[in-house]
Image (spheres, grey):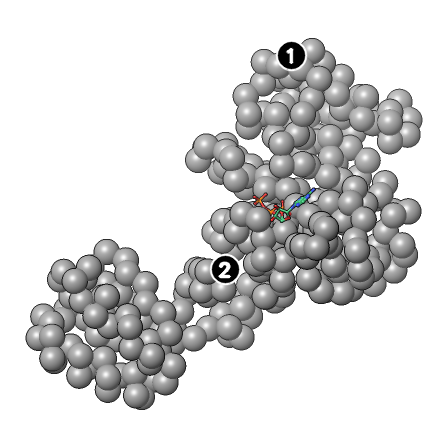
Amino acid sequence: MAIIQVNHLKKSYGDREVISDVSFRIEDGECVALLGPNGAGKTTIIKMLLDITKPTGGQILFQGERHDRMRQHIGYLPQHPTFYSWMTGKELLEYMGELSGIDKKHLEQRMDELLDLVGLSREKDKQIGTYSGGMKQRLGIAQALIHRPKLLIMDEPVSAMDPLGRRNMMELLKVIKLETTILFSTHILHDAEELCDNILILNQGKLLVNDSIAQVTVHHQQPVFIIQAPRVKEWVPLLANNPIVESIDQSGTAAKIRVTNIDQGRDWLLDQINQMRLPVQKFELVQESLEDIFLRMVK
Ligand SMILES: Nc1ncnc2c1ncn2[C@@H]1O[C@H](COP(=O)(O)OP(=O)(O)OP(=O)(O)O)[C@@H](O)[C@H]1O
């Protein structure tokens, strides 16, 4: 049975629908990335899963039951966790553990396990106000896991971190995902690719992709022509206005061109290259990368 099943979920603020008919499921043991640009609706979906915000339509089931009764089985790391800065790391975990109803003997053992897991054993008796951003984020993960939740939900857990903090967090999440089902939101494709089995791509409140990482390219890849030639800024605008060109992306000395019809597109592009007497260094037809697919979908 799915840990979470989301059916035709909708959310409106006033007249504005910010989540439109979103359906997906997360199976036990999976790691799923909710991927989308700023404002796509990631936090709104997470808040509905946590029952912080009520949907305006649709249904969320947690292991087949109404999810509003199942909140205690979910661990949550918000985008910007806030703590009492005068508490020590250990005191916070103790407090959260007591709130979750864990008895003293088990709590002591669980705190030690988690402080070790997130690499804060040595700093456990220091006040949280003295922790770095990365340490606070790791403490946030420990508090989210204190009651051994069946599902860990994290809202952009690595987006605001520096490269070293990010790396540490990714390695930590790789360990956690061995034992816990994870849903995390991000706007960085690379994080999703590195950690997850499945991705949900959200744009403007609509779910565009719900697939395994391995299958996304198989199901959504389109061919693109790559032309590499000097003075790319001069010739790209000359190609962009023809109706056969669906999109054209310039990067460095090359352009990636998506056309409506491959054979006609090839003939037309070769013709243009001749007419412009472009000193072409490369002309090839390739399949889109995962990043190309993501960028095309969220544009
Ligand atoms: N309380 C609210 N009232 C009105 N509109 C809201 C409210 N909360 C969110 N929105 C709007 O809903 C849309 C989705 O916002 P949301 O925060 O879910 O996006 P997001 O994908 O999490 O973005 P980010 O990556 O920037 O956190 C945005 O257009 C936002 O302005």
Q: Which residue is mark 2?
A: 298
Residue 173 shown left or right of residue 291 in the figure: right
In the image, residue 162 above or below residue 149:
above
Q: Secondary structure at mark 2?
A: helix
Q: Residues within 10 Å of mark 1 (few under 14, many from 20)?
A: some
> Is tag 1's residue or tag 2's residue first in the polypeptide sequence?
1
Residue 145 position in % (x across, y down): 74, 36
Residue 218's label in the rendered image is none
What residue is at 31 percent from the left and 88 percent from the top?
263
Residue 289 position in % (x across, y down): 41, 65
Q: Is label 2's Cβ within 8 Å of ligand 1?
A: no
Kind of residue at badge 2:
Val
Residue 179 shown left or right of residue 279 in the figure: right
> Can residue 205 be spotted in the picture?
yes
What residue is at 62 percent from the left and 62 percent from the top?
206
Residue 249 shown left or right of residue 146 in the figure: left
**Residues at marks 1 and 2 touching, judged by CB atoms closer than 8 Å:** no
Q: CA distance from mark 1 to mark 2?
A: 43 Å
Q: Could you say which quadrant of the image residue 59 lies in?
A: bottom right
Q: Which residue is mark 1?
A: 126
In the image, residue 250 above or below residue 280:
above
Residue 66 position in % (x across, y down): 89, 54
238 or 157: nearer the viewer:
238
Label tally = 2
Kind of residue at badge 1:
Lys
What residue is at 30 percent from the left and 88 percent from the top?
264
155 or 29: nearer the viewer:
155
Q: Could you say which quadrant of the image residue 280 lies in?
A: bottom left
> Can residue 27 be spotted in the picture?
no
